[in-house]
Image (cartoon, rainbow, N blue to C red):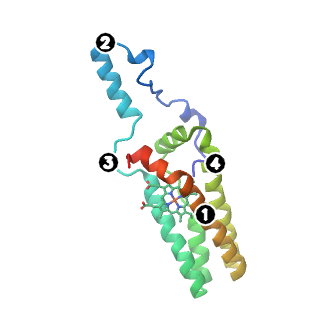
Amino acid sequence: MLGGAPTDQLMHIKVCAPPGSPNARMNKPLLVLTTALFLGGCAAPPSGPAMSLRGIMRDMGRDAAAVADGLMREDYALVERAALKVAEHPQPVPEERVRIITWLGPRAGRFRGYDQEVHGHGQALAAAARQRQPKAALEAFHKLQSACMACHLEFRQPYLTQFYGS
Ligand code: HEC
């Protein structure tokens, strides 16, 4: 989901001065101003509006549930449709992608890797459903869910703490 973030966007990120850095030691009005910038540009408001990733995730949750339902009913058209939606889920808006990638830093590759797994297993699942192969579909679904879980276990709580303060 973060795969397409162009590097030129990454270069325009505001650099945040750590509180103890030389830039932080300046006269009072300036300090107030930089503090405001620091809070506004870098730290997340604890209860601001939800970022777009949440809605994307909710849709993925619904689509994954539809896959499970479709498998039980042997409704392969439904499985294929829902699996393709999961595989081709939208990305967060560019501004958020930059914030997320910046926060992830060196972990961005792992985060992206889980997302690519979701994409690949979602495609495999859709293909298995198209060919009406329940066993292959179930296997792909299992791998898909494992990728969801792996990312959640590693990143979800830290993400919520970072961007929602909770
Ligand atoms: C690359 C990492 C990553 C992958 C892969 C991933 N998620 Fe998430 N997911 C997150 C993060 C981060 C959150 C927290 C977002 C938030 O609450 O704003 C989240 C939150 C959620 C939520 C809770 C949303 C809410 O209303 O609080 C659901 C449901 C969800 N994901 C479903 C899925 C499903 C289903 C998959 C796999 C098909 C999946 N996710 C794959 C990172 C990921």
User: Label 4 amino acid?
Assistant: Arg
State the separation of the CA atoms marked 1 and 4: 18 Å
Tag 1: Cα neighbours inside 10 Å, few (<14), some, or many (≥20)? many
Residue at the disc numbered 3: 47
Give the alpha-carbon distance from disc 3 to disc 4, as whole Å.
27 Å
The answer for how far apart the CA atoms under marks 3 and 2 are is 31 Å
Label 3: how many Cα within 10 Å (few below 14, some 14–19, many 20+): few
* 154 horizontally vs 16: left or right: right
- Please tell me how crowded label 2 is: few (under 14), some (14-19), or many (20+) other residues with Cα within 10 Å: few
Q: Residue furthest top?
A: 27
> Judging from the image, what secondary structure is the residue with disc 3 in?
loop
Contact flag, marks 3 and 2 (Cβ < 8 Å): no
- Residue of label 2: 27
Q: Position of residue 19 (x, y in %)?
A: 41, 24
Q: Mark 1 vs mark 4: which is more N-terminal?
A: 1
Spatial CA distance of label 2 from label 4 is 42 Å
Quadrant of res 79? bottom right
Residue 80 location, x and y as percent? 62, 75
The mark nearer the N terminus, 2 or 4, is 2
Question: Where residue 7 appears, x then y in whole percent?
Answer: 60, 35
Which badge, 3 or 4, is on the more N-terminal residue? Answer: 3
Identify whether 47 is placed above or below 106. below
Query: Of helix, strand and loop, which one carries label 1?
Result: helix
The dot on residue 110 is: 4
Q: Which residue is mark 1?
A: 87
Of tags 1 and 2, the one toward the viewer is: 2
Mark before the other along the chain sequence, 3 or 2: 2
Q: Is residue 149 visible?
A: yes
Q: Secondary structure at mark 2?
A: loop
The amino acid pointed to by label 2 is Asn
Residue type at mark 3 is Ser
